[in-house]
Image: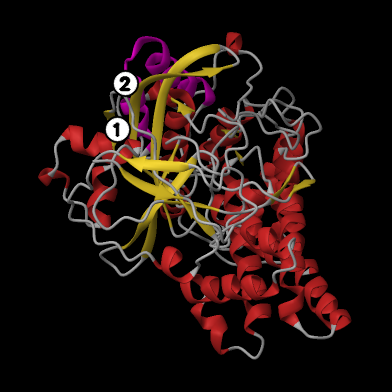
Amino acid sequence: MAIPVILFGPIGFCPNANKEYTVTNAPIQTSLVFDNSYAIRLDGFYAPVQGDVAPKPRLVALNEPLATDLGLDVATLTAEQLAEIFSGTTSPSGATPLAQAYAGHQFGGFSPQLGDGRALLVGEVVNQVGERRDIALKGSGRTPFSRGGDGKAAIGPVLREYIVAEAMFALGIPTTRALAAVTTGESVMREDGPLPGAVLARVAASHLRVGTFQYFAARGEVDKVRQLADYAITRHYPQARDRANPYLALLQSVSQAQADLLAKWMTVGFVHGVMNTDNMTISGETIDYGPCAFMDNYDPRALYSSIDHQGRYAYGQQPVMARWNLARFAETLLPLLDVDETRAIDLATTEVNRFAELYLPAWTARMRAKLGLQDALPEDTKLADDLLATMEGQNVDYTLLFRGLSEPSFGRAAEVKLLFGDPSAFSEWFKRWQLRLKQENSDPTVRAAKMKQVNPIYIPRNHKVEEALQSMTKHGNIAPFERLNNVLSHPFDLLEGCEDYAVPAPAEFGPYRTFCGT
């Protein structure tokens, strides 16, 4: 029997607010125990929605360790049931599927209403160590926020997010995670024609975004901004609750989380590609892997997104744009920071301007570890900066250089120098690095072992990612995807027979461009 779910009116400005969605299948009983605080505590911040019925859902990837961590006993479910759940065709028992409302600055222009146009939050669970986690679907069909889109996703972008998110997790970088990928049995139309449809199931500490706050701040709904801020404090930064100004403490906590996150991005050469405010989480997790990529040759202007024509979100711009996004977040909190508007602006401005003071030490600490330095000295920031300066314009592979330095006896100097067209500047820098290491009198073997735990040998090389995506998209062959994921789950360990995953793309690979997948 079809059960009608009417999208209610508290978000009266939602398009299609009266559209009727139907659940065609009864919920599937699972071992997941849901505790849906967003649905319960934030009435009016979302629209209930059900995923589309997939014609022929098929499970193509399942992250079993993550499923176990969430309390999902996959052994009690068939592959067909898992495919139904992770396609959005049927909900697990206890779920309250909904589409979240949010706004956002997209490439600098403000859109007052975005929201989950092709995603839904299935619900929340508390994992085995007491951490609250969202389970969400991406590509499960239209919602009231779809704005004319089909709400679907193609298999390529789904697998890209799966690959990169899990690689980031293995690298120790805060991120949403991939739980499952399902093909739907239908085609979705994109610029290059019909493509196999798919849905990604992902897990996050939450899906609260800067854009979530902007949605209600833009409408002057201060009470809702306060309600959202209180929820964010309880969920992510409970220590802020006891501060003299909890909302200022929230801003400070988010600033620190983002500074730490950006330092981690930058020191592995990750380029997000679309750092809009709706893609910036309050939790400090990386989210929404659309036109992302890892940098091969070091270049501050490295950019892969096909839609970023001005280079707004190029590699070297990312810390700048994180600060810009924080300024937008601070604007939403102004009425909460102080009843005196001038005082509120001063407080917010001070915190936003402190971002560089948070980011630079976080970046320097990670670069110090990459260079095998244990003691903190003032000149370390310049030493790291000068190394990057020697690499610029020389087509030096970022990952290979740092891995090459991670050897006893002051690194494999001769091999590293071969990465440079003109190694003269690097040779001078290398002498300075040797002298700096001698100040610590560290054991070369111990130092090398520590460096190898922060300097990966395997990253999602763009040509290997494309190889996996094209294999599945064109031939339905999931094997290259599975092998790539397995290699990337051990980014710091040399794996036998995996040499081709640790080298740059062949010359014929050419300029690389990525796409959002919408």
Is residue 223 something that shows in the picture? yes
Residue pictured at 85% horizontal, 78% vertical: 346
- Where is residue 276 shown, x and y percent of the image? 68, 46
Give the SS element for disc 2. loop
Relative horizontal placement of residue 163, taking residue 251 as reference (left or right): left
- Where is residue 498 shown, x and y percent of the image? 35, 25
Q: Residues within 10 Å of mark 2 (few under 14, many from 20)?
A: some
Hey, what amino acid is under mark 2?
Ile
Relative horizontal placement of residue 369, taking residue 76 as reference (left or right): right
Occupied quadrant, residue 38? bottom left
Residue pictured at 72% horizontal, 33% vertical: 299
Relative horizontal placement of residue 433, taking residue 9 as reference (left or right): right
- In the picture of the structure, the residue carrying the numbered disc 2 is 478
- In the picture of the structure, the residue carrying the numbered disc 1 is 61
Q: Quadrant of the C terminus?
A: top right
Residue pictured at 40% horizontal, 33% vertical: 199
Hey, what amino acid is under mark 1?
Ala
- Where is residue 331 shown, x and y percent of the image? 77, 66
262 and 382: which one is in front? Answer: 262
25 and 87: which one is in front? Answer: 25
- Where is residue 417 shown, x and y percent of the image? 63, 29
Occupied quadrant, residue 494? top left
Occupied quadrant, residue 420? top right
Residue 311 part of the magenta segment: no
483 and 339: which one is in front? Answer: 339
Residue range in magenta is: 462-488
Q: Residues within 10 Å of mark 1 (few under 14, many from 20)?
A: some
Marks 1 and 2 close (CB-CB < 8 Å): yes
User: Is 163 above or below relative to 381?
Assistant: above
Residue 463 part of the magenta segment: yes
